[in-house]
Image (tube, rainbow, N blue to C red):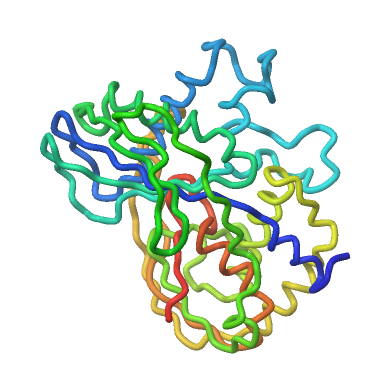
Amino acid sequence: MGRDGGLDVLEEIGLSAFEFVIQAEGQLLLPEYKGSTLRGAFGHAFKQVACPLKGRPCPTCLLGPKCAYFTIFETPPPPDARRLRKYSNIPHPFVLLPPSEPKQVYAPGESLSFGLRLVGRAADYLPYFVLAFSELGKVGLGKGRGCYRLQEVFGLEGQSRRRRLYSKEKGALLGSPTTHYPGRPRQEDHDRKALSLRFLTPTRIRYQEDLCLDLEFHILARSLMRRLSALAYFHCSLDPEGWDFRGWIARAEGVGLSRRELRWYDWERYSARQDRRMMLGGFVGEASFVGDLGPFMPLIRLGEWLHVGKGTSFGLGRYEVVG
């Protein structure tokens, strides 16, 4: 068992962060929240560029785990998995960060940018992500299928530094991305007794089978531990064997709520795969907690980068530490 009941595994979860810049060639008509549109169209484009045996169901395909699309989008737990076998599907190893602006109409020549975060081995598939978003621009995006051109891709080096990894002129990747380890301890977090979080996109956390609005710290911690332990095990080859889940939940229940200003935000998306419209509301706003928070900060810091709850690949569940 690792120190601190096994949460030291969080220190080794590596991820890479990117900014994609696209320029409208025709008029782009996009919804106010663009995460669903980006995610749906991108998933189809990724399969088109990565799948050599189109039309064959992934579970019965000969290529299986050797296929980029299967690895990123469809991978079930391996039959020989020693941990977390109850997961029917493991979390996707990527998070899309759609543009935060509510703007819906982009004229030809206007640009917009969005973020992408890749966890563990998923960073090896960056060329597929770049090619998929480039090809998607030719097919079109949003209402009316407006076309765009992928202008640049930047790798984020730090909070305010970035490095160009792709440009339309070069048409190839320029170097490798930087790996970040947000779960590594920070001096300022060691003895933290108060914490405020701002939830920026609809956050869908289930607790006792219901979507949660009355957030408590232990509910947040449960959701983060489920998500991050699965990402660590299945995408980073890290074993959370030493995680004392019950012990950490008990500690989280000792953290109190000092302020909660959350509201429900409803939005819907159309699922082409299921051929139906889906309501995917969640809470946004702020919540503050008091107690022995220092030991939980690696969990919180990783969640800042990788989001929490359901729909994270659409950009849902995004939050930031305030102050």
Q: Which residue is at a point 85% across and 44% down the rendered structure image? A: 82
The N terminus: image quadrant: bottom right
What residue do we see at 34% from left, 56% from top? 266
Query: What residue is shown at x 12% (from left), y 34% (from top)?
Result: 108
Q: Quadrant of residue 301?
A: bottom right
**Which is more toward the observer, 122 or 62?**
122
Q: Using residue 171 as the reference point, say whether residue 210 is left or right of it.
A: right
Location of residue 41 with respect to 253 vertically, above or below = above
Q: Position of residue 2 (x, y in %)?
A: 84, 66
- Count of numbered badges drawn on the protein: 0
On screen, residue 98 above or below 199: above
Farthest left residue in view: 107
The image shows residue 174 at horizontal and vertical percentages of: 44, 36
Vertical placement of 182 versus 87: above or below? below
Q: Nearer the viewer, residue 319 or 202?
A: 319
Q: Nearer the viewer, residue 46 or 220?
A: 46
Left or right of 305, for residue 98: left
Left or right for 39, reference 15: left
Position of residue 114 measured from the top left corner of the image (x, y, whole percent): 34, 47
Of residues 44 and 119, the one nearer the viewer is 119
Dividing the picture into quadrants, the one containing residue 216 is bottom right
Which quadrant: the C terminus? bottom left
Q: Position of residue 248 (x, y in %)?
A: 75, 73
View extreme (right): residue: 1
Rendered position, 208 above or below 291: above
